Amino acid sequence: MNTYKEIEKNENVVFDYTSFLSASCRQSHLSFTDALRAVLPSFEVLWKSSLPAGITDEEKLQQQALKVLSTNTSDTNNLIRLLRLARTERIMCLRITMPYALDYEQLEYITDKTDCAITFDDDCGEVLNIRINAPS
């Protein structure tokens, strides 16, 4: 179980979803792993790649997201995958900047599927502060 201090150390993890979309568009080929993730959505949480030691939580999350998220999937499902990935990386608090605001139903669906709390950092709803609840 994560303690408050473990959660606090991850307080400043930021994920720029717009940059992710841009970087994903630059990847030109579909790999076997991409195809497998499309067929087996739970695969993204189980699949781990070897990452270099000494990288920040933000860099780790960004690198993993490029392998797990897909522009062929809805933004809502991508955010669910991202939050599940963050949980497996023990990142319990993060800020996600979006290119646009999500509607209430999308936010409700995300919170239901990931057991998290979402607040807004701006009036437009494009910056989401997310606290993932510790597993019970």
Image (cartoon, rainbow, N blue to C red):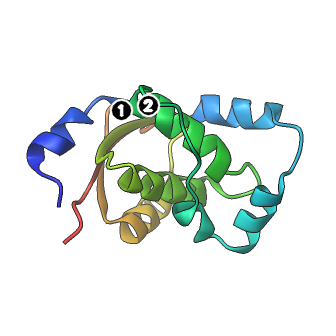
Q: Residues within 10 Å of mark 1 (few under 14, many from 20)?
A: some
Label whose residue precedes the other's in the sequence (2 or 1): 1
Relative image position of residue 135 (x, y in whole percent): 24, 67
Relative image position of residue 59 (x, y in whole percent): 49, 29
Judging by the rendered image, the residue that carries numbered circle 1 is 13
Residue in the foreground of this view, choosing between 114 and 127: 114
Q: Residue at x 70, y 58 (%)?
A: 73
Mark 2 and mark 1: span between their CA atoms?
5 Å
Judging by the rendered image, the residue that carries numbered circle 2 is 58
Relative image position of residue 120 (x, y in whole percent): 33, 40
Relative image position of residue 21 (x, y in whole percent): 68, 36
Q: In which quarter of the image is residue 116?
A: bottom left
Residue in the foreground of this view, choosing between 78 and 35: 35
> Which secondary structure lies at badge 2?
helix
Disc 2 marks which amino acid?
Glu
Are the residues tagged 2 and 1 within 8 Å (C-beta)? yes
Can residue 98 be seen here? The reply is no
Which quadrant: the C terminus?
A: bottom left
Disc 1 marks which amino acid?
Val
Which quadrant: the N terminus?
A: bottom left
Q: In this view, does 19 lie to the left or right of 79?
A: right
Q: Residue at x 10, y 46 (%)?
A: 4
Residue in the foreground of this view, choosing between 123 and 94: 94
Up-down relation of residue 45 to residue 99 (above or below): below
